[in-house]
Amino acid sequence: MAGETKEIVINPITRLEGHGKITIFLDDHGDVSRAYFQVPELRGFESFLVGRQAEDAPQITSRICGVCPTAHHIAATKALDDMYKVEPPEAARKIREMVYNVFMLEDHALHLFFLGGPDFVVGPTAPKAERNVVGVIQKVGLEIGKRVIGMRKDLRGIIQEVGGKVIHPVLGLPGGVAKAVTPEMQKRFAEVADRGFEFALFCEKLLEDVVLGNPEYVKLITSDVYTHRTHYMGLVDDRNRPNFYDGAIRVVDPSGREIERFPVRDYLEHIAEHVEPWTYVKFPFLKQFGWKGFVDGPESGVYSVAPLARLNVSESMATPRAAELRERFFETLGGRPVHHTLANHWARVIEIVSAAERFKELVNDPALTDPNVRTLPTATPKEGIGVVEAPRGVLIHHYKSDDRGVLTSANLIVATQHNSARIAMSVDKAARGVIHKGVVDDGILNQVEMAFRAYDPCHACATHSLPGHMPLWVKVFDARGELVQEIRRDG
Amino acid sequence: MMAGPFQPRIVAFVCNWCTYIAADAAGVARARYSPNVRLIRTMCSGRVDPQFVLAAFEKGADGVLLCGCHPRDCHYGEGNYKALRRFVLLKKLLGQMGFEDGRIRLEWISASEAEKFRRVVEDMTEQVRRLGPFKPNGGA
Amino acid sequence: MTKKTKPKVAFYWCASCGGCEEAVVDLGEAVLDVVNAVDIVFWPVALDFKVSDVESMPDGSITVSFINGAIRLSEQEEMAKLLRRKSRFVIAFGSCSHMGGVPGLANLWDKESIFRYYYHEAPSLQGKDGGEPVMRVKVPEGTLELPAFWDTVKALDQVIDVDYYVPGCPPTPQLLANAVQALLAGNLPPKGSVLAGTRALCHECELNSTKPEKLLLKDLKRVHEVRIDSAKCLLAQGVLCLGPVTRGGCDALCVRGNMPCTGCFGPTDEVRDYGAKGLSYLSSIIDFNEEKDIVRAMEKVPDPVGVFYRYSLPHSSLRRKREVK
């Protein structure tokens, strides 16, 4: 086809954290021969952590991401516990886990209403001026809008009170937390927890009404265009129930069978990273299978993390309402595991409920207000590895230190990174599914973007690079290598 | 292409009551020593803000020399101790920033030690000459 | 009759963690008031507008662009310059655009050393040398490009002219709201001002009354070595708090969290190099006069650059490590 060059510039990729670049190559018929999703940022945190005082790691690494700073902060803090071989007292552990669940609750709500949710609430091909939180508020009403904003504010207020700041908190120390929770604080937090639970149920109802009640959306969610059959990884407790704060790493294969289960300490025996020259992000894969390329299936090393994966590795949930929702989720979608990427949005809502329930449990725990929140480390530091479930997936912080407690090396495997192969595959598949005969417009491209938005990716995290918002750049080339269309979104 | 060997530029912060007088005396005695040092007189070595040291390098110095009165002889009591503490910490920081040993130096030189002044300047000039020019910003 | 148009506002993020954007969202309900009072023409995290929309605007037609994040890629410099052309005012908000920020610590390294670790030496690579990303690469279907990565991180005012700064990592929503209101009311201080407090943090800290008149320490403590008493000045307890050398305006949030200030608001107006001042302050409170004692005391600060230049390395006099070997 003689390229009728149309310049379409999508500038920037939007409603995610970070940047990306998509280059789409067309064949002779104007169909997609391959779409590459490139992440064009690298920061070098692992380099400049070298030489830093170990106790500064929780605050330095939280700057990897201002949307999920608490995840990095707590992962780093746990790595320091390990490095100094020190156990926090019970109150400190509960404070950390409580703050962590509050954070998961408000962060997932952010994604639902501000980032990924708008695609469903206003519609994937709605005019771009409406595909955002303002459009959501217009659709659901100002009262609801204010309720969401108010709820997040109160939740984040708790993180700020216990953690000093909500964006880049300061509470984490090896062996404890900086500040205790008083009975007075506990009483106020408990009131917020009650409302948080009501809010979680409200999110669940919203999802049911707006998404699950709409057959078009259900069709979209279960369509093959947005489906991949990969392995799944998540943190679970000893009863294989997801736990955001701690647990063993469990991996199931595309049929749902457990194939690996290990403490994070052993991660290097199970996970390796692959490099491609066309993107800055690295691609973790399961060593058991090796890197077989960007392919699905039980023999591929590709795996996925985050809400859908966490449900897929679970046998049940640790809190009652979430457990019910989990049952319904698998019943509706044909059993565990579910391979539909867009089901991440639904899984995320179930996690909103589970975080709200766990928050309620912890806030009412009498041990929470014990004033002893520190165990002072005495061992000589050497090496420590910590893990949490960030909103976007398994997060691993690994540090080595000299005798003085100055870091000599750092290795971070960050949430979205684990998904980077599957995201690349999802974008490729979605592009092939929605672009035909060289026809590309804003609505079609948004459907390609929905493929990555479902993962709630955080590219600042994935590349722990100096952030960058690189524009999302979509270049469409025909079979002759001529640029047919270019869509740039600057971030 | 500049002819001749590299001529280091060294900024010396000298205190009014001790080193400055020694430097003056060296001059009066027509002592011979390398002309690579620019003197900046302060009333006390304790006046030297670390910002001055960094600014000197930023503006093209290849080395910085800090001079004050001997311990217990400070005209104002404790200024030289403050200078010493700053120097220790500054050296550590500059080491992290890629500075070689010898680019900054601290010496106690009293008013009567003109010869010491001459010797220190010669010595430091040679040392910095060996180290080579300091390029601020790593050529960024 | 002319219709009163709302001022146009843009938000842009360079090398940023997204925290400054979150700070805008944390305005809470007030963000809806902002959205109503202005016409947001560009805000990638939340709205689907394009660069081409900005490019087609007349120069100077955006009333204010709030730019956060450090400058690490050429594309970020290009966007900064574009927004500069199109805007009457440019405000650098957040430590990264103000002074370089935490990512500025990468100025202790360079591209080659960062790539070397990340793509060749990290333990999870398992020693397999898979190459590294390049700016242009041929794949079976065509050619792919990546943006270039610089050796040195810069603050915003090192690439464009900046009118005002809102400091902090991140700035508090209150400071942001104040800045927006001041702009809308036309009530601005002299160009180049930092829109926060003018005095050091100690003045607004609740613990100030417990800070000794003459502070002298024989013993410094790293934060994990001591239980911090929340009713007493941290410095008096031997913990290195940078409050005395840091600009106020944040309400001492970290201290309320029972941890010391780490300096994210940067220096007060009179100071050129924040780290040097921090270092100077520590030197003045260490109560030793013999070199060996001083050296030993300073062992409690094994990482002066990380402590004193955590947010401001690109803005410092030296800007970066000389050479990375």
Image: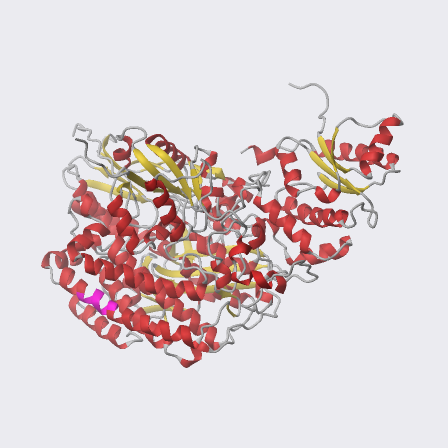
* Side of C262 where A188 appears, left or right: left
Residue B119 in picture, x, y percent from top left = 84, 34
The residue lying toward the viewer, choosing from A235 and A253, is: A235
Residue bounds of the magenta highlight? A199-205
Residue C37 in picture, x, y percent from top left = 26, 45
The residue lying toward the viewer, choosing from B5 and C250, is: C250
Residue A124 in picture, x, y percent from top left = 17, 50
Residue C170 included in the magenta stretch of the image: no
Residue A425 sits above or below residue B55 on the image: below
For residue C321, what is the image quadrant?
Answer: top right
Which residue is at the far bottom?
A366
Residue A121 in picture, x, y percent from top left = 17, 55
For residue A117, what is the image quadrant?
Answer: bottom left
Residue A200 included in the magenta stretch of the image: yes
The answer to whether any part of residue A473 appears in the image is: no
The residue lying toward the viewer, choosing from A240 and C221, is: C221
For residue A220, what is the image quadrant?
Answer: bottom left
